[in-house]
Amino acid sequence: MAQSKHGGRKLGQSNKMTALVVDDNMINRTIHHRLLDNLGVENEVVSNGKEAVDIHYSGKMFDLILMDMDMPIMNGIEATKKLREMGIRSVIVGVSSRAMEEEIREFMEAGLDDYQEKPLTMSKLVSIIHKIN
């Protein structure tokens, strides 16, 4: 199977692109899940950073991870650092309603590939996906 530069599968292969939505807010999880579904991206949802780390420990891999910043148990910054320490090379996009420059910089330095303010829209997601390919 062909590998993209991020270690996931390329679009156009027999396997679809995969994504993990990490957000403690059920409405945001549902919106992001449906947007990805509408784009033909297979995706799973978890409600905090620890669940995101655990799902990778179980052997699952994703091409894209949409990571919320503020979550209970393990926030997006901690989870992103942990995933990078584990060697996860998926594209990780931080998604948050926070706009304070210092917090965004800390999130980016944790290992993000991109940062987007909530709410994610179809056009923002399409742009993110095109950057991966």
Image: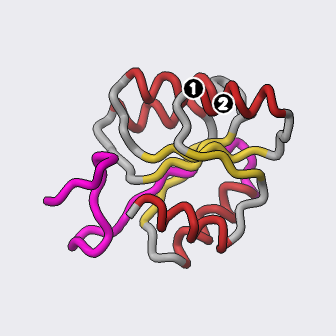
Q: Pick whichever, 99 or 9, lies toward us.
A: 99
* Residue position for label 1: 110
Dot 2: element: helix
Dominant SS of magenta comes to: loop
Rendering coords of residue 61 (x, y %): 33, 45
Please tell me whether residue 51 is drawn above or below residue 22 in the rendered image. Answer: above
Q: Is residue 16 magenta?
A: yes
Q: Is residue 22 left or right of residue 13?
A: right
At 45% across and 76% down in the image, what residue appears? 40
Q: Hey, which quadrant is residue 60 in on the image?
A: top left
Q: In which quadrant will I find the C terminus?
A: bottom left
Q: Is residue 97 magenta?
A: no
Residue 132 lies, in percent from the top left, at 42, 59
Crowd tier of the residue under label 1, counting other residues whose Cα lies within 10 Å: few below 14, some 14–19, many 20 or above: some
Contact (CB < 8 A) between labels 1 and 2? yes
* 110, 16: nearer the viewer: 110
Residue at image location 46% in from the left, 52% down from the top: 64
Left or right of residue 132, residue 93 in this image: right
- The residue identified by callout 2 is 107
The kind of residue on which mark 2 rests is Phe
For badge 1, the amino acid type reads: Ala
User: Residue 45: x, y in percent?
Assistant: 55, 51
Q: Secondary structure at mark 1?
A: loop
Q: Quadrant of residue 57?
A: top left
Residue name at image x 54 percent, y 68 percent: 36
Spatial CA span between label 1 and label 2 = 5 Å
Q: Residue at x 29, y 63 (%)?
A: 10
> For the magenta stretch, what is the residue range?
1-27
Q: Is residue 74 above or below residue 70?
A: above
